[in-house]
Image (cartoon, rainbow, N blue to C red):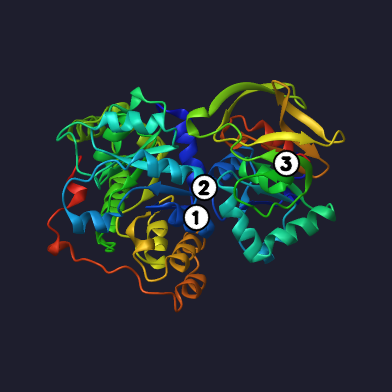
Amino acid sequence: MYNKSGVELAKMLKNGVIMDVTNVEEAKIAEDAGACSIMALERVPSDIRKDGGVARMSDPKMITEIKKAVSIPVMAKVRIGHFVEAQILEALEIDFIDESEVLTPADPKLHIDKTQFKMPFVCGCRNLGEALRRIAEGASMIRTKGEAGTGNIVEAVTHLRQLHGEIRDIKNMDKAQLVFAAKEMGVSVELLELVQKEEKLPVVNFAAGGVATPADAALMMQLGAEGVFVGSGIFKSSDPQRMAKAIVESVAYFDNPKKLAEISNDLCSAMPGLEMETLDTKMAERGV
Amino acid sequence: MSNKDKINVGILAFHGDIEEHEEAIASLGFSSIRLKYLEDLDNLTHLILPGGESTTISKFLDKTGIGKAIQKRAKEKTLQIYGTCAGAILLAKEVETQYPVSNLGLIDAKISRNAYGSQIHSFETELNFKPTKQNFEAIFIRAPKIISHSDKIDVLCEHQEEAMILEQDNVLISTFHPELIRPAIIHEYFLSK
């Protein structure tokens, strides 16, 4: 993989929760709840969805303030293909850049050439082809996209199952089938051979896009995610402090239904959810 | 390592690179369990505190009572303990950090968290492991730094006069991630203790 220390940093985040925060106060709540990292952004995805318009990289001032306020790694988002926003985030010396479909794409076709950066990148995917194309461009970490800002887990489940289903298919392919699959996906045979050998992606894979409850987070972990991003799900719930703690615990105890029952008991209202059919914009369709 | 049957390895499994330690242990022909429940600690002879965020792991150590139980077993000298990166922070007597972690205080060292700065300052370097005189490539990821330590503890590895691996009786710490190195020479040393 291209960015070795980035790939290794992602391993240290495993079995953890990365939370979207929009100010210093929220960043501290996230750290206090046991988040392993935070994503600094001006609006959580559900507000971006509501407000409409063009969503861009956040103001360096707010990112820097958040970075100063916490001891855990800080991530921030850039628009797909907007390599100058990425240069700015690299200059701010944050820890991870999310080239994200949650923001309005800057380039309708191309992603950022992430090999030009020392800073590691995480990118979204809906399937194996998207994941491997992002890795070929230099991503150090992958997250299945789900549908951000909906509080609806259905797309996150779809994408995670799709990814792992395809990895299982790859496992049994002979060389001729691999070459054909590589052509179909637009990725190198070498990268597919690596997936076949390891029976997993060559970088860490978190789940994202729709996690609203501890049960959602545990579902992602049981489906094979190595950790979870929670965007709007924490700070759009009725009690962010409790929800943040509960989701961190549900990732640690994802395989213990009794503990999950305790964690979910009398919690607080989860964020309001949206049906996929009602959406004007499907963010997951951006950047393929 | 002839006493394979007598060794029970546990990896503290609330958060961090748990699988990477499992794989390192497996590469040496041993199996391990994931420690999340207090009662599982009793059977262990060896315990690893993995890399990750010490703030996150520390909360689970407090809440479950596993932290106190580890301290007790450490003082009875009935448990070999190894902490990498975040694990090293949690085992130190004193921690310099912006956010308080409830460290277990089991090794006479003072550690500064994220001492090298953010991810862009992560680095790789060749080190030598003194007990076996082997060289290896170490990767330091948002690594902590050992600022000071008691004269009475052994420095098993150093770089530019900074201690990178320390050992005090039954407690071993490294500021980097030997679980990512093959052959897993430092895990092998730990299991031979």
Q: Which is nearer the eye, A90 or A270?
A: A90
Disc on res. B191: 3
Labelled disc at residue A70: 2
- Foreground pick, A12 / A67: A67
Task: Locate the N terminus of chain B and report the quarter of the image it occupies.
Answer: top right
- To which chain does the residue with label 2 belong? A
In this view, which residue lies farthest toward the bottom? Answer: A266
Q: CA distance from mark 3 to mark 2?
A: 36 Å
Residue B75: image location, x then y, percent = 83, 54
Quickly name the residue at label 1: A28
Expressed as whole percent of the image width and height from the top left, the position of residue A71 reads 54, 45
How much space separates mark 1 and mark 2, taking CA atoms?
Answer: 7 Å
Mark 1 vs 2, N-terminal side: 1
Residue A96 percent across, percent down from the top left? 41, 38
> x, y (%) of residue A253?
51, 63
Can residue A89 be seen at all in this image of the molecule? yes
Residue in the picture at 27% in, 27% down: A188
Q: Is residue B70 above or below residue A144?
A: below
**Circle 3: element type:** helix
Q: In the rendered structure, which amino acid carries the disc numbered 3? A: Leu
Quarter of the image for the C terminus of chain B: give it.
Answer: top right
